Amino acid sequence: MITLYSYPNSRSLRAAWTLEELGLDYTCQYIDLTSGEGQGTEYLTRHPDGKVPALKDGELTLFESAAICRYLAERYGQGSLMPGDPTQRAKLDQWLFFIVSELEQPLWALGKHKFALPQERRVPAVIPTAAWEFQRALAALQREFDGEGWLVGEEFTIGDILLGHTLSWAKSAKQPLPNALEAYLQRCNERPARSAAQKREQEAQEAEA
Protein backbone atom coordinates (compact mmCIF):
# COMPACT_ATOMS: atom_id res chain seq x y z
CA MET A 1 0.00 0.00 0.00
CA ILE A 2 1.26 3.44 -0.95
CA THR A 3 0.64 6.34 1.44
CA LEU A 4 1.22 9.95 0.45
CA TYR A 5 1.55 12.49 3.25
CA SER A 6 0.30 15.78 1.90
CA TYR A 7 -0.86 19.33 2.48
CA PRO A 8 -2.93 21.12 -0.20
CA ASN A 9 -1.25 23.79 -2.35
CA SER A 10 2.21 22.48 -1.54
CA ARG A 11 4.82 20.39 -3.34
CA SER A 12 2.87 17.27 -2.37
CA LEU A 13 0.58 17.97 -5.34
CA ARG A 14 3.46 16.87 -7.60
CA ALA A 15 3.52 13.43 -5.98
CA ALA A 16 -0.27 13.09 -6.01
CA TRP A 17 -0.33 14.15 -9.67
CA THR A 18 2.26 11.49 -10.51
CA LEU A 19 0.27 8.84 -8.64
CA GLU A 20 -2.87 9.82 -10.54
CA GLU A 21 -1.12 9.85 -13.92
CA LEU A 22 0.07 6.30 -13.21
CA GLY A 23 -3.37 5.18 -12.04
CA LEU A 24 -1.98 3.84 -8.76
CA ASP A 25 -4.00 2.96 -5.69
CA TYR A 26 -2.86 5.07 -2.75
CA THR A 27 -3.95 6.64 0.51
CA CYS A 28 -3.65 10.41 0.87
CA GLN A 29 -2.88 11.34 4.47
CA TYR A 30 -3.29 15.01 5.38
CA ILE A 31 -0.58 16.51 7.58
CA ASP A 32 -1.73 19.68 9.33
CA LEU A 33 1.40 21.77 9.02
CA THR A 34 -0.30 24.83 10.50
CA SER A 35 -0.88 23.04 13.82
CA GLY A 36 2.68 21.76 14.02
CA GLU A 37 1.82 18.14 13.15
CA GLY A 38 4.79 17.99 10.81
CA GLN A 39 7.14 18.52 13.74
CA GLY A 40 5.64 15.68 15.75
CA THR A 41 7.89 12.78 16.71
CA GLU A 42 6.00 10.28 14.54
CA TYR A 43 6.00 12.34 11.37
CA LEU A 44 9.66 13.32 11.72
CA THR A 45 10.50 9.64 11.12
CA ARG A 46 9.01 10.11 7.64
CA HIS A 47 10.43 13.54 6.83
CA PRO A 48 13.34 14.76 8.97
CA ASP A 49 12.40 18.41 8.40
CA GLY A 50 8.68 17.88 9.01
CA LYS A 51 7.63 19.00 5.53
CA VAL A 52 5.57 17.43 2.74
CA PRO A 53 5.49 15.40 0.67
CA ALA A 54 6.62 12.14 2.16
CA LEU A 55 5.77 8.77 0.67
CA LYS A 56 5.60 5.31 2.19
CA ASP A 57 5.59 2.33 -0.16
CA GLY A 58 5.95 -0.90 1.75
CA GLU A 59 9.26 -0.73 3.62
CA LEU A 60 10.43 2.33 1.68
CA THR A 61 9.96 5.88 2.98
CA LEU A 62 10.94 8.81 0.76
CA PHE A 63 10.85 12.58 1.00
CA GLU A 64 11.56 15.35 -1.57
CA SER A 65 9.00 15.72 -4.34
CA ALA A 66 11.35 15.19 -7.30
CA ALA A 67 12.78 12.01 -5.78
CA ILE A 68 9.27 10.69 -5.08
CA CYS A 69 8.01 11.43 -8.59
CA ARG A 70 11.08 9.85 -10.16
CA TYR A 71 10.79 6.72 -8.01
CA LEU A 72 7.12 6.26 -8.85
CA ALA A 73 7.69 6.73 -12.58
CA GLU A 74 10.67 4.38 -12.64
CA ARG A 75 9.03 1.65 -10.55
CA TYR A 76 5.46 1.78 -11.78
CA GLY A 77 5.49 3.79 -15.00
CA GLN A 78 5.99 0.92 -17.43
CA GLY A 79 7.37 3.36 -19.96
CA SER A 80 5.18 6.33 -19.08
CA LEU A 81 6.24 9.59 -17.39
CA MET A 82 9.92 8.75 -17.92
CA PRO A 83 11.86 8.29 -21.18
CA GLY A 84 13.17 4.81 -21.91
CA ASP A 85 16.30 6.07 -23.66
CA PRO A 86 19.24 6.73 -21.25
CA THR A 87 20.14 9.97 -23.04
CA GLN A 88 16.61 11.28 -22.68
CA ARG A 89 16.51 10.20 -19.03
CA ALA A 90 19.68 12.20 -18.47
CA LYS A 91 17.97 15.23 -20.05
CA LEU A 92 15.00 14.66 -17.74
CA ASP A 93 17.28 14.60 -14.69
CA GLN A 94 18.94 17.78 -15.92
CA TRP A 95 15.59 19.56 -15.95
CA LEU A 96 14.46 18.12 -12.61
CA PHE A 97 17.59 19.51 -10.96
CA PHE A 98 17.23 22.84 -12.75
CA ILE A 99 13.58 23.22 -11.75
CA VAL A 100 14.11 22.55 -8.05
CA SER A 101 17.42 24.40 -7.70
CA GLU A 102 17.06 27.38 -10.03
CA LEU A 103 13.45 27.98 -11.08
CA GLU A 104 11.59 27.11 -7.90
CA GLN A 105 13.93 28.53 -5.29
CA PRO A 106 13.39 32.25 -5.97
CA LEU A 107 9.64 31.64 -5.89
CA TRP A 108 9.99 29.96 -2.51
CA ALA A 109 12.10 32.92 -1.34
CA LEU A 110 9.22 35.19 -2.35
CA GLY A 111 6.77 33.02 -0.44
CA LYS A 112 8.92 32.78 2.65
CA HIS A 113 9.40 36.52 2.95
CA LYS A 114 5.75 37.28 2.18
CA PHE A 115 3.92 34.76 4.36
CA ALA A 116 5.70 31.51 5.24
CA LEU A 117 8.35 32.66 7.69
CA PRO A 118 7.50 34.05 11.14
CA GLN A 119 6.88 37.78 10.85
CA GLU A 120 10.09 38.68 12.65
CA ARG A 121 12.13 36.61 10.19
CA ARG A 122 10.77 38.16 7.00
CA VAL A 123 12.98 40.57 5.04
CA PRO A 124 10.85 42.48 2.51
CA ALA A 125 13.97 43.81 0.78
CA VAL A 126 14.63 40.26 -0.48
CA ILE A 127 11.45 40.19 -2.58
CA PRO A 128 12.57 42.28 -5.61
CA THR A 129 15.81 40.30 -5.86
CA ALA A 130 13.94 36.99 -5.71
CA ALA A 131 11.58 38.16 -8.47
CA TRP A 132 14.59 39.14 -10.59
CA GLU A 133 16.20 35.72 -9.97
CA PHE A 134 13.05 33.94 -11.08
CA GLN A 135 12.85 35.91 -14.32
CA ARG A 136 16.52 35.18 -14.97
CA ALA A 137 15.95 31.44 -14.49
CA LEU A 138 12.82 31.65 -16.65
CA ALA A 139 14.87 33.21 -19.45
CA ALA A 140 17.37 30.34 -19.17
CA LEU A 141 14.52 27.82 -19.45
CA GLN A 142 13.26 29.53 -22.59
CA ARG A 143 16.63 29.22 -24.30
CA GLU A 144 16.10 25.46 -24.32
CA PHE A 145 12.31 25.08 -24.10
CA ASP A 146 9.90 27.42 -25.85
CA GLY A 147 6.71 25.95 -24.38
CA GLU A 148 5.81 23.91 -27.46
CA GLY A 149 5.22 20.21 -26.94
CA TRP A 150 6.57 18.70 -23.73
CA LEU A 151 9.76 19.36 -21.81
CA VAL A 152 11.66 16.16 -22.71
CA GLY A 153 10.93 14.30 -25.93
CA GLU A 154 7.44 13.95 -27.35
CA GLU A 155 5.66 12.54 -24.30
CA PHE A 156 4.45 14.06 -21.03
CA THR A 157 6.89 13.21 -18.21
CA ILE A 158 7.46 13.96 -14.56
CA GLY A 159 9.52 16.91 -15.81
CA ASP A 160 6.26 18.48 -17.00
CA ILE A 161 4.65 17.76 -13.64
CA LEU A 162 7.38 19.65 -11.80
CA LEU A 163 7.59 22.44 -14.36
CA GLY A 164 3.82 22.86 -14.59
CA HIS A 165 3.50 22.98 -10.82
CA THR A 166 6.34 25.49 -10.49
CA LEU A 167 4.84 27.76 -13.14
CA SER A 168 1.54 27.58 -11.24
CA TRP A 169 3.40 28.88 -8.21
CA ALA A 170 4.75 31.69 -10.37
CA LYS A 171 1.20 32.64 -11.38
CA SER A 172 0.14 32.64 -7.73
CA ALA A 173 3.10 34.90 -6.96
CA LYS A 174 1.99 37.23 -9.77
CA GLN A 175 5.17 36.65 -11.76
CA PRO A 176 4.67 37.31 -15.49
CA LEU A 177 5.04 34.41 -17.90
CA PRO A 178 5.50 34.62 -21.68
CA ASN A 179 2.47 33.63 -23.75
CA ALA A 180 4.00 30.33 -24.90
CA LEU A 181 4.58 29.20 -21.32
CA GLU A 182 1.11 30.41 -20.32
CA ALA A 183 -0.29 28.09 -23.00
CA TYR A 184 1.98 25.25 -21.86
CA LEU A 185 0.84 25.72 -18.26
CA GLN A 186 -2.79 25.59 -19.33
CA ARG A 187 -2.18 22.27 -21.13
CA CYS A 188 -0.56 20.88 -17.99
CA ASN A 189 -3.39 22.08 -15.76
CA GLU A 190 -6.03 20.61 -18.07
CA ARG A 191 -4.77 17.07 -17.56
CA PRO A 192 -7.42 15.05 -15.67
CA ALA A 193 -4.78 13.58 -13.35
CA ARG A 194 -3.89 17.02 -12.04
CA SER A 195 -7.50 17.80 -11.13
CA ALA A 196 -7.89 14.36 -9.55
CA ALA A 197 -4.74 14.89 -7.46
CA GLN A 198 -5.92 18.27 -6.22
CA LYS A 199 -9.29 16.77 -5.31
CA ARG A 200 -7.67 13.90 -3.39
CA GLU A 201 -5.59 16.30 -1.31
CA GLN A 202 -8.59 18.48 -0.53
CA GLU A 203 -10.70 15.47 0.43
CA ALA A 204 -7.95 14.24 2.75
CA GLN A 205 -7.89 17.63 4.46
CA GLU A 206 -11.67 17.74 4.79
CA ALA A 207 -11.71 14.23 6.27
CA GLU A 208 -9.49 15.46 9.10
CA ALA A 209 -11.50 18.61 9.76
Image (spheres, helix red, strand yellow):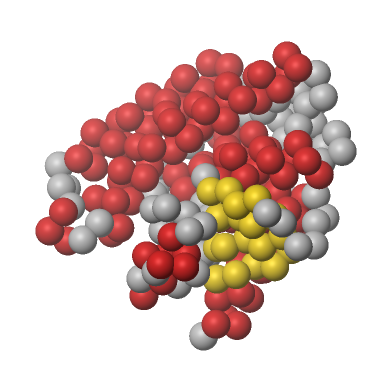
- In the foreground, 55 or 8: 55
Q: Residue at x 81, y 44 (%)?
A: 76
Vertical position of residue 76 compared to residue 129: above or below: below
Q: Indicate the position of residue 196 as horizontal and vertical percent values.
A: 72, 63
Vertical position of residue 87 compared to residue 127: above or below: above
Q: Residue at x 45, y 44 (%)?
A: 170
- In the foreground, 189 or 152: 152
Q: Indicate the position of residue 72 as horizontal and vertical percent values.
A: 72, 44
Q: Is residue 204 left or right of residue 35?
A: right
Query: Looking at the image, which residue sits at the far bottom?
Result: 209
The quadrant the N terminus occupies is: bottom right
Indicate the quadrant where residue 118 lies. Answer: bottom left
Q: Residue at x 64, y 57 (%)?
A: 56
Query: Looking at the image, which residue sits at the far right?
Result: 78
Q: Indicate the position of residue 138 as horizontal and vertical percent values.
A: 46, 28
- In the foreground, 95 or 67: 67
Q: Residue at x 55, y 71 (%)?
A: 30
Q: Indicate the position of residue 142 as horizontal and vertical percent values.
A: 53, 22
Q: Does the image show residue 82?
A: yes
Indicate the quadrant where residue 35 lies. Answer: bottom left
Q: Does the image show residue 176?
A: no
